[in-house]
Structures are given as C-alpha cells and as structure tokens.
C-alpha cells in the first residue's frame, strides 16, 4: 500500500486485471481494489498519483448501477474512466450518456488537453490507446 501509485477501482470488467498489468509493465505500481473503497481508505495510500475507474457490464442508468463514494472526485487526483467508469464520471458531473449508432471498440488516438501533470510526462500526444 505504501508505494501504490495508481488505484484501479474494479467494476467487473474482464479487462481490469489486464489494465493493471499494463500499468505495472510501465514500471508504475498499480493495485486493483473493490469499487466500494471509501475516501478514508484511499487517503491511506501515501504515494497515490491517480485513480482509474474500470469498465463493467452495466449502464449507469440501470436501477442497480454501481456507485462509488462521490467524495473521491474531490480528492485532487487525476481520475480516468474506462467504459463504465467514464459513464460514471459523465453521469456524476451532469453529462449525458447515450447509445451510439455503433459500438466502439479498438484503438484510438489519445488527445491530451493538459499534459502538465507528471502522470503524462513521457506520453506523447496522439499515442495509440
């Protein structure tokens, strides 16, 4: 827990462990944790640099949709949402999640709007993700 740099909150995606492994391959310590982790528990991670909200099988509009401790959004760390995690972020901040004409899966180009955070130090704009 002392050296964990990235927390991956697990919403049940089949790719959560792969995501954490890829982060570790970049020599960054990542830990997968339960989505019900509290802000108090997160604050125990002394070297934390960011949080990733993983994907999952649900939609934020389902009656039993997964929720997290909303205070996590005010902890002052970068938060990345992947699939369901991004839906959750959008929904939390008043965004609208709609069905697309087609499913999107595959590689995309990363556009960094603000690369001043050390987390993105060696990540070139346009990186394929």
Image (cartoon, grey):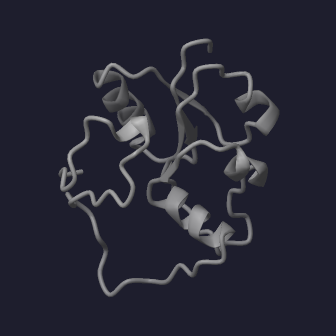
Q: Which image quarter: residue 102?
A: bottom left
In the picture as drawn, the residue positioned furthest to the right comes out as 40
Q: Which image quarter: residue 114?
A: bottom left
Above or below: residue 7 compared with residue 27: below
Q: Who is closer to the viewer here, 47 or 80?
A: 47
Visible residue check, residue 32: yes
In the picture as drawn, the residue positioned furthest to the top comes out as 2
Visible residue check, residue 57: no
**Horizontal placement of 109 versus 10: left or right?**
left
Q: Who is closer to the viewer here, 100 or 39?
A: 39
Q: Which image quarter: residue 82?
A: bottom left
Q: Residue at x 74, y 71 (%)?
A: 63
Above or below: residue 57 compared with residue 44: below
Q: Who is closer to the viewer here, 75 or 118?
A: 118
Q: Residue at x 59, y 42 (%)?
A: 77
Q: Residue at x 24, y 51 (%)?
A: 129
Q: Residue at x 53, y 37 (%)?
A: 50
Rendering coords of residue 99 (x, y %): 44, 83
Q: Which image quadrant: the N terminus?
A: top right
Rendering coords of residue 91 (x, y %): 63, 71
Q: Who is closer to the viewer here, 111 or 15?
A: 111
Rendering coords of residue 88 (x, y %): 60, 63
Above or below: residue 108 compared with residue 37: below
């Amino acid at each position: 827990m002392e050296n964990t740099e990235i927390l991956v909150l697990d919403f049940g995606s089949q790719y959560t462990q792969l995501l954490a492994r890829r982060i570790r391959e970049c020599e960054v310590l990542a830990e997968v944790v339960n989505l019900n982790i509290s802000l108090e528990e997160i604050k125990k991670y002394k070297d934390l640099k960011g949080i990733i909200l993983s994907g999952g099988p649900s939609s934020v509009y389902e009656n039993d949709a997964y929720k997290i401790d909303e205070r996590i959004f005010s902890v002052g760390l970068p938060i990345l949402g992947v699939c369901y995690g991004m839906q959750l972020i959008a929904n939390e901040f008043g965004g609208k999640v709609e069905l697309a004409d087609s499913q999107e899966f595959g590689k995309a180009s990363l556009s960094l709007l603000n690369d001043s955070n050390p987390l993105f130090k060696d990540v070139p704009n346009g990186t394929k993700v």
